[in-house]
Amino acid sequence: MRRKFDYNLQDNQIMDNNKVIIFSAPSGAGKSTIVNHILKLHPEIEFSISATSRAPRGEEKHGREYYFFSADEFRRMIAEDRFVEYEEVYPGSFYGTLKSEVERIWAKGHIIVFDIDVKGGVNIKRIFGDKAFSVFIQAPSVEELRKRLVGRGTDCAEAIEKRVAKAASEMEFAAGKFDYILVNDDLDKAFAEAEKVVDQFVAR
């Protein structure tokens, strides 16, 4: 289960311009595609690289898409209180946000953007409050989500069904917990919608 750490805002001297944008979605909803689009338009927004204990996929590299650690290394870092939040998604499969990553980006004066799972997005919003803007991206339907996951060609049938089942529960869990819901049924429209809400938050 995910555990929320108390992130002491005063001790970390969070300034008025320290902002957080959260994009959460089930696998296959198009979250990473939309986040990458936003990053190209906003040099003042920087991607927060999550930590994980899963193996790299395809051409993923340590320190680019994720910080990759073994499950034992991840457990040791949990014991050392090095995460803002983390989750054991499946037994031995951890994801989390390093405190050092948040501090690294804010030290540059940049806005943090999180590309994170649904429960993580809810927890980060709770931690950072009105300094955070949370967006939940969803596919038009669970069946469409299944088609997208199959089209990726990166997971076996069993893994896809596990992801689809998790997605259905995440969509239910997300109801009422995010600042904005973006339905990605047309990518160009989703890009435009994401640009609009991000621009509004950045300008606050």
Image (spheres, rainbow, N blue to C red):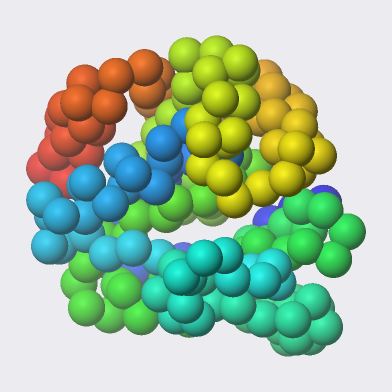
Residue 104 picture quarter: bottom left
Residue 143 in the figure: left or right of residue 23: right
The answer to whether residue 154 shows anywhere in this view is yes
Residue 194 against residue 93 in the figure, above or below: above
Residue 160 is drawn in which quadrant? top right
Q: Quadrant of residue 64?
A: bottom left
The percent position of residue 36, horizontal first and vertical second, equals 28, 51
Q: Where is residue 23 drawn, in percent x and y? A: 42, 42
Above or below for 111 versus 136: below
Q: Is residue 83 above or below residue 17?
A: below
Where residue 1 appears, as percent x and y from the top left, is 82, 51
- Identified at 42% across, 40% down, the residue is 31
In screen coordinates, is 181 left or right of 62?
A: left
Q: Position of residue 193 (x, y in %)?
A: 22, 25
Q: Residue at x 61, y 26 (%)?
A: 146
Q: Is residue 123 in view?
A: no
The quadrant the C terminus occupies is: top left
| Labels in figure, total | 0
Outermost residue, right side: 91
Q: Is residue 102 left or right of residue 93?
A: left
Q: 115 or 84: nearer the eye?
A: 115
Residue drawn 27% across the image and 27% down it: 187
The residue located at (48%, 24%) in the rendering is 138
| Horizontal arrangement in the rendering, residue 96 relative to residue 71 (left or right) | left
